[in-house]
Amino acid sequence: MEAEKIEEGHILLQGRYKQLTSTILSDEAYPFARELLGTSLNTIQDFYSQTTWLELGNTEILKELGFPGQTIPEVVGPGDAICSDCSNPQGECFDNVIPGSKLSSGYYEYDVPGSAIFVIPKPDNAGKCGHGGIMDDGVAKKAVGGISKETSSPCFSPHHYLHK
């Protein structure tokens, strides 16, 4: 769900839903079904921890996420600014999501062998949200900082206060 690929993640979950039900009901391949379920749950967790869903004022789950035939709210476009700079790019960050924005997710840059095929660089000076934290190599690009809520630690998750 990183790098504003929320719609793609929703489509992936829809496909997994169909595959999961078929794997259980038709194939009775329960070990594979557990793997599919675990992978899907991780993707759902990423949605809540790496998007602006909570910052946009949503307090309930997105019931449509991953279900076949369902749509999700409109996602930000390539030219839309979503975030402003954090005052502390390497730590906790408050109110950096622009009010009234569409749904977005953060860009997470890292440089390890083989990562180039997976990492989508954060656009320079575009007002896009970063993942943030000390592991994000793009944290200094505009908009500096990030929106991650994956942990309760400010050094890894700038929006740690929304972790729970």
Image: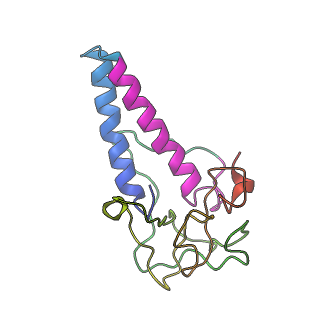
Q: Which residues are magenta?
A: 31-59
Q: Is residue 22 magenta?
A: no
Q: As drawn, is 27 to the left or to the right of 99?
A: left
**Above or below: residue 132 compared with residue 35:** below
Q: As drawn, is 101 to the left or to the right of 25?
A: right
Q: Is residue 47 magenta?
A: yes
Residue lying at 75% horizontally and 55% vertically, measured from the top left: 161
Q: Position of residue 136 (x, y in %)?
A: 55, 66
Main secondary structure found in the magenta portion: helix
Quarter of the image holding residue 20? top left
Q: Nearer the viewer, residue 91 or 130?
A: 91
Quarter of the image holding residue 160? bottom right
Q: Is residue 64 visible?
A: no
Quarter of the image holding residue 82? bottom right
Q: As drawn, is 75 to the left or to the right of 91?
A: left
Q: Nearer the viewer, residue 15 or 67?
A: 15
Q: Position of residue 31 (x, y in %)?
A: 36, 19
> Quadrant where the C terminus lies?
top right
Q: Position of residue 131 (x, y in %)?
A: 55, 64
Residue lying at 47% horizontally and 67% vertically, measured from the top left: 109
Extreme left residue here? Answer: 27
**Above or below: residue 149 compared with residue 109:** above
Q: Position of residue 130 (x, y in %)?
A: 54, 69
**Above or below: residue 114 compared with residue 88:** above
**Above or below: residue 139 compared with residue 48:** below
